[in-house]
Amino acid sequence: MSLSTSRAPASGCTRARSRSVPGFALTEAALARSLDLIAAEDADVARALEHAGYPPERRRPTGFATLMRIIIGQQLSTKAAATIASRLETVLVGNFTPAGFLALGDEELRAIGYSRQKIVYGRGLAEAIATGALELDGMERQSDEDVAAAICALKGFGRWSAEMYLLSSLGRPDIWPAHDVAVQEAVRRIKRLDTRPTPKAMDEIAQPWRPHRSAVAVFLWHYYANPPL
């Protein structure tokens, strides 16, 4: 089976253009199949795969809680984001819903660790879902582009946020987070580049990996966390 090398458009919130089908397409077995196909044609990926092994499934539930965790994780270390998310779960235990979040005051959210900006983003997300402005039900049957457009319409959500939801929650097979710093660094390492590639360069490097770029992204996060000694 050959890999697509068609070029994606350079604009828009997300550049993946595949139509979606219901079902999570990034199970561990599916990741392994896709990576085997890519490794057969890319010696750098093959070498990295031999070192790090196949990645575990990277699945997150669909819905409000995951989108809220995406807000929390923006511009924070994994550890710091996990701490804030854990505090929020404790405060909202049994009621991690838009209504539950909107019932919290600004002081409560600041005590949890929210910045003033993220309070605005969080309330905007909760209000959009509560009022029906953002329809999460049925996203599994929407195209990558339509899902990304709906998420990017929210204040505080950009391309990276939409890509995280498409990839980790909806399990879309050809999402490429070219702006993700960890993915950029992993590409630099496996391709033996002198500097971290720009998003534009990332897109060019990833063209031969279509339509399996999500599998590569999941592997690159795994490789970044398990670098060669």
Image (cartoon, rainbow, N blue to C red):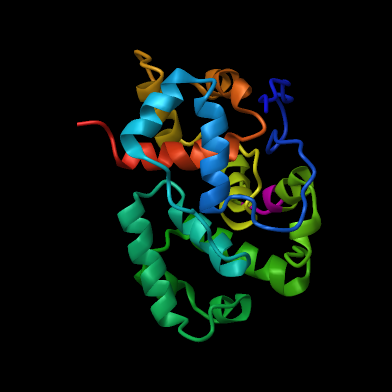
Frontmost residue, 40 versus 93: 40
Q: On the picture, is 25 further left or further right than 46?
A: right
Q: Position of residue 200 (x, y in %)?
A: 57, 20
Residue extending farthest left:
229
Q: Position of residue 18 (x, y in %)?
A: 76, 39
Mark yes or no: residue 2 visible.
yes
Residue 179 sits above or below residue 124 on the image: above
**Residue at position x 63%, y 63% in the image:** 125
Frontmost residue, 58 versus 139: 58
**Residue at position x 37%, y 40% in the image:** 53
Q: Quadrant of the N terminus?
A: top right
Q: Which of the 4 quarters of the picture holds residue 158? A: top right
Mark yes or no: residue 178 visible.
no
Q: On the picture, is 138 further left or further right than 185?
A: right
Q: Position of residue 36 (x, y in %)?
A: 52, 34
Q: Is residue 224 magenta?
A: no
**Residue at position x 50%, y 86% in the image:** 94
Question: Main SS type for the magenta part?
Answer: loop
Q: Specify start and end residues of the magenta stretch as a single range.
A: 151-155
Q: On the picture, is 131 further left or further right than 180?
A: right
Q: Which of the 4 quarters of the picture holds residue 64? A: bottom right
